[in-house]
Amino acid sequence: MERVRGFVTCGNSFAAGRGAAHYMPEGAARERCNGILYYQFLGKLLKNFDADQGQIIRELKEIQEKLCRKSDLVMSFTGTEKAYGDFRQLTAASRFCGSAREREPGWYQDNLLPGKSEAFIIPSEVSYVALGGIGEYTGEDYLLGRMVSFDYLWAKIRAEGGAYGCQMSVFPNQSWTMSSYRDPNVKRTIEAFRSASRWLKELELREQELLNYKIGAVAGYDRTPKTYVQAKRMDSWYLRQEEPQVRAKVREGLLKASEEDLKNRRQAMERFVGEGTVCVLGNRARIEEAAGQFDNVTVLME
């Protein structure tokens, strides 16, 4: 029930996540574990549980044997030096330590979903539209994402189109996304996403305007996180084998970015909006109006 409510109340997250499953292995893995595909898997599992329960139990045991290994355990600790000393003593005496790693960890790979655009009909008067693809993760790109959100998309999607919200996000894994929230449109929004490079071509900024954008971008980028959030971020760096210095490099590029630097990202923007994957969760009538935009339309919920 929680997931069903999520499709209707925060469909933009599910649309962006589903879109990512078409262009990056990480997105495909997340979709299978926590997205629309997982919801469909659960529905099929429950429907056929009595007939398939034997096979389900066998497969779960196989998964348990692959995942639940002491030698693959990674512990993360956040606290004072004294507390860390106590932690080391406790773990050293526990049964979790002392196991040799049976194999070196490798990068997880998952099959990407086929196609470039799809839509899912849900019982909603509004829609959630997402466009996603692979870009780069530089200071200029991060700043550009903020500018597209608060200038171009705000005008086209929210002010003119009537959506409750919209944004462009540039992520450290080099995923770029545009999305709309509680949007009365589908076709119009897709067209607006696809036209973003024109806005960049015509961009003209006064020095103070650029400075204001940078101030807002740095405030978002360097927002002081709670301890729990900072710990998760550092865990992610470790597991992804990312260097923390990347953040400093991105920040430096953001602060040094000029109008010319931003306009030089036009080719990357054109590639993103032209080749990106579209995914929509929303109203049947609006999706049917834009049917020519999709490789596949599925009734997810009635």
Image (cartoon, grey):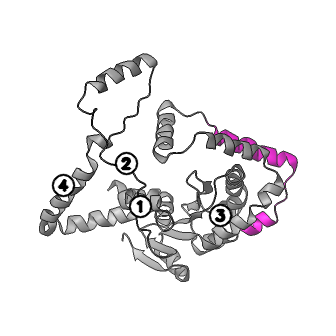
Q: Which residue is mark 2?
A: 104
Q: Which residue is mark 3?
A: 157
- Residue drawn at 51 percent across, 69 percent down: 279
Q: Amino acid at mark 4?
A: Lys
Image coordinates for residue 186, horizontal then vertical, percent:
57, 72
* Quadrant in which the C terminus appears: bottom left
In the depicted structure, whether residue 289 falls above or below residue 48: below
Judged left or right of residue 265, residue 298 is: left
Q: CA distance from mark 1 to mark 3?
A: 35 Å
Image coordinates for residue 102, horizontal then vertical, percent:
29, 46
Region in magenta: 196-223
Q: Amino acid at mark 3?
A: Ile
Q: CA distance from mark 3 to mark 2?
A: 47 Å
Q: Which residue is mark 4?
A: 61
Mark 1 or mark 3, earlier in chain: 1
Q: Residues within 10 Å of mark 2 (few under 14, many from 20)?
A: few
Q: Residues within 10 Å of mark 3 (few under 14, many from 20)?
A: many
Q: Which residue is mark 1?
A: 109
Q: Amino acid at mark 1?
A: Gln
* Secondary structure category for the residue under label 2: loop
Mark 2 or mark 4, earlier in chain: 4
